[in-house]
Image (cartoon, grey):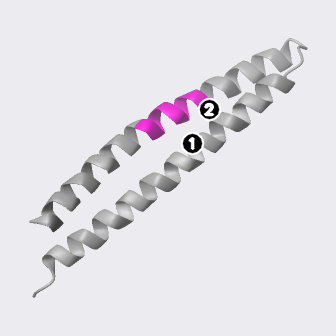
């Protein structure tokens, strides 16, 4: 019973992490578009680059959490299916 609840929790975590990754990816892409436009216009992009680094770092952290949740779900699924 506990394994099933833990597996369901992991599946929900994965779904949430995937949605978070989609949002973070869009933030990184939007920041990159702004930097490109500002650079083309000859404006200083130093602050924008710092923000892009923050967004990308956040995306990497979310990706790591997603991978951890996926590995946990795979382990729980394998454990659940293993003969006892």
User: Going 61% across and 29% down the picture, which residue do you hit?
Assistant: 29
The magenta stretch spans residue 51: no
Q: Mark 2 vs mark 1: which is more N-terminal?
A: 2
Q: Position of residue 10 (x, y in %)?
A: 28, 55
Q: Position of residue 76 (x, y in %)?
A: 24, 70
Q: Residues within 10 Å of mark 1 (few under 14, many from 20)?
A: many
Front-most of residues 50 and 33: 50
Q: Residues within 10 Å of mark 2 (few under 14, many from 20)?
A: many
Discs 2, 1 touching: Cβ within 8 Å: yes
Direction bottom: furthest residue:
84
Seen in the image, is 72 located left or right of residue 36?
A: left
Query: Would you identify the image quadrant in which residue 37 lies?
Result: top right
User: Going 62% across and 23% down the picture, which residue do you hit?
Assistant: 30
Start and end of the magenta stretch? Answer: 20-27
Magenta-drawn stretch, dominant element (helix, strand or loop) = helix
Query: Would you identify the image quadrant in which residue 34 lies?
Result: top right
User: What residue is shown with label 1?
Assistant: 59
Separation of marks 2 and 1 at Cα, in angstroms: 8 Å
Seen in the image, is 4 located left or right of residue 78?
A: left
User: What residue is shown with label 2?
Assistant: 28
User: Going 68% across and 36% down the picture, which residue do you hit?
Assistant: 54
| Quadrant in the picture for the N terminus | bottom left
Disc 1 on helix, strand or loop?
helix
The magenta stretch spans residue 26: yes
Above or below, comparing residue 28 to residue 40 in the picture:
below
| Quadrant in the picture for the C terminus | bottom left
Direction front: furthest residue:
2
Above or below, comparing residue 47 to residue 21 in the picture:
above
- Looking at the rendered image, the disc whose residue lies closer to the viewer, 2 or 1, is 1
């Amino acid at each position: 019973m506990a394994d099933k609840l833990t597996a369901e929790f992991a599946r929900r975590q994965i779904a949430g992490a995937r949605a978070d990754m989609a949002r973070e990816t869009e933030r990184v892409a939007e920041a990159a578009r702004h930097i490109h436009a500002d650079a083309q216009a000859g404006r200083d992009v130093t602050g924008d680059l710092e923000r892009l680094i923050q967004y990308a770092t956040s995306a990497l952290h979310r990706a790591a959490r997603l991978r951890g949740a996926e590995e946990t779900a795979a382990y729980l699924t394998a454990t659940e299916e293993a003969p006892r």
